[in-house]
Amino acid sequence: MKQKRSYKRTERVGQQLHEVIAGLLLTDADDPRLQMVQVTAVEMSPDLRYAKVYFIMLDGEEPEEGVEPALERFAGFAQRSIGEQLRLQFVPRLTFKFDEAVMRGRAMDELLSKLPESSET
C-alpha cells in the first residue's frame, strides 16, 4: 500500500525554490540593492509553472525605489539557475511580491508592546 504524502508537491517544490532563491540572493546577486532582500515564502501555482516569491527587506522597511525592478532582472538569472539545480519538468516563471503580511505583523507587535501590562490580582 502506498503511503500518503504529508504535504503537496507544490509545497515541496516551493520549499526547494525558496532555498535556491535565498542562496542565490546571498551569493550571486550582483545588484547591491538585493543584499537587503530576504525571501519569506514561495507560493506555487497548481501546475508548477508559476511561482510567487514573497520577500521583505532586512532593515524592516518597505523596499526602496529600484529594488523591485532589480528583482525582476534577477528573476531571469534565478530561473536559469533553478533549471540547472533542480530536476523539474518546467522551470517556473518567478514573480516577486513584497510580503506586506510581515510588515502588518510587525506593526501589530509594536502596538501590542505599547499596551500597559494588566496586573491580575
Image (spheres, grey):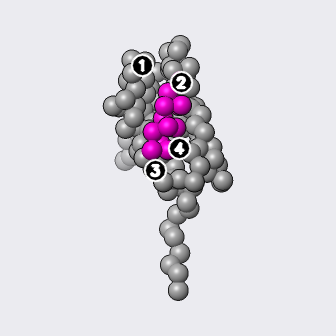
Tell whether 95 sits left or right of 29. Answer: right
Label 3: which secondary element: loop
Which amino acid type corresponds to the residue marked 2 in the rendered image? Arg
Vertically, is 50 above or below 104? below
Front residue of 75/5: it is 75
Looking at the image, tell me whether mark 2 or mark 3 is earlier in sequence order: 2
Marks 2/3: CA–CA distance: 21 Å
Front residue of 46/74: it is 74
Q: Residue at x 37, y 47 (%)?
A: 121
Front residue of 64/84: it is 84
Visible residue check, residue 102: no
Q: Could you tell me if the residues under marks 2 and 1 are in contact, i.e. CB atoms within 8 Å? A: yes
Per the image, the residue denoted by label 2 is: 73
Which amino acid type corresponds to the residue marked 1 in the rendered image? Asp
Per the image, the residue denoted by label 1 is: 31
Marks 3/4: CA–CA distance: 15 Å
Residue 15 painted magenta: no
Magenta stretch: helix, strand or loop mostly: helix
Q: Could you tell me if the residues under marks 4 and 1 are in contact, i.e. CB atoms within 8 Å? A: no
The stretch in magenta equals 73-84
Marks 2/1: CA–CA distance: 10 Å
Numbered disc in front, either 3 or 4? 3
